[in-house]
Image (tube, rainbow, N blue to C red):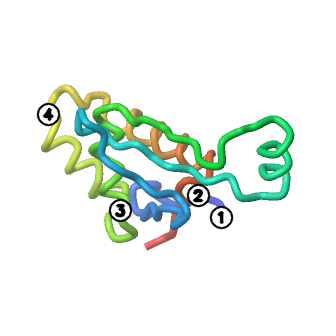
């Protein structure tokens, strides 16, 4: 990805990796389903019996944000929706949201495109 230091992070649009699927748990939270299809994943599955798909449970805020990552909403748009939904409980809004987005980006669940 291009150097984001010279750009406003709020103008970026997060886009989900299409291989990552999600479903709603019984409590309404989002559960991400992450497939392991690489060569080393298949070796580990055969010899160490690792799962073909991992399930990752998101917390309340992550479960609210994940569906908003649709390739259309900017980080700013998502922040405004989070603030409207959670109010004061979302504070500190931007550091928390950006931390969440950077974590899911580090796992390659999302990428950012410049609007």
Say whether disc 1 or disc 4 marks the residue closer to the N-terminus: 1
Asked whether 24 or 102 is in front, the reply is 24
Say whether disc 2 or disc 3 marks the residue closer to the N-terminus: 2
Q: Which residue is denoted by mark 1 in the rendering?
A: 1
Residue in view at x 30 percent, y 46 percent: 24
Residue in view at x 80 percent, y 52 percent: 42
Measure the alpha-carbon separation of dots 2 and 1. 8 Å
Which dot, 2 or 1, sits closer to the camera? 1
Asked whether 35 or 100 is in front, the reply is 35
Measure the alpha-carbon separation of dots 4 and 3. 19 Å
Residue in view at x 55 percent, y 53 percent: 109
Which dot, 2 or 4, sits closer to the camera? 4
* Residue 74, disc: 3
Q: Is residue 88 above or below residue 84?
A: above
Label 3 SS: loop
Q: Which residue is denoted by mark 4 in the rendering?
A: 87
Measure the alpha-carbon separation of dots 2 and 3. 14 Å
Residue 95 is left or right of residue 88, and the answer is right
Q: Is residue 110 above or below residue 47?
A: below
Label 2 SS: helix
Q: Is there CB contact under 8 Å for labels 2 and 3?
A: no
Q: Which residue is denoted by mark 2 in the rendering?
A: 4
Say whether disc 4 or disc 3 marks the residue closer to the N-terminus: 3
Say whether disc 1 or disc 3 marks the residue closer to the N-terminus: 1
Label 1 SS: loop
Residue 102: image quadrant is: top right
Measure the alpha-carbon separation of dots 1 and 3. 16 Å
Q: Is there CB contact under 8 Å for labels 2 and 1?
A: yes
What percent of the width, then of the height, locates residue 66? 36, 50
């Amino acid at each position: 990805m291009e150097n984001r230091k010279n750009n406003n992070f709020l103008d970026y649009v997060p886009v989900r990796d299409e291989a990552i699927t999600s479903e709603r748990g019984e409590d309404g939270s989002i559960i991400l389903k992450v497939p392991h299809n690489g060569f080393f994943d298949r070796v580990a599955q055969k010899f160490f019996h690792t799962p073909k798909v991992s399930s990752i449970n998101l917390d309340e805020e992550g479960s609210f944000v994940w569906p908003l990552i649709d390739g259309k909403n900017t980080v700013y748009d998502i922040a405004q929706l989070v603030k409207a939904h959670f109010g004061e409980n979302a504070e500190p809004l931007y550091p928390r949201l950006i931390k969440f987005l950077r974590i899911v980006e580090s796992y390659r669940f999302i990428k950012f495109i410049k609007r």
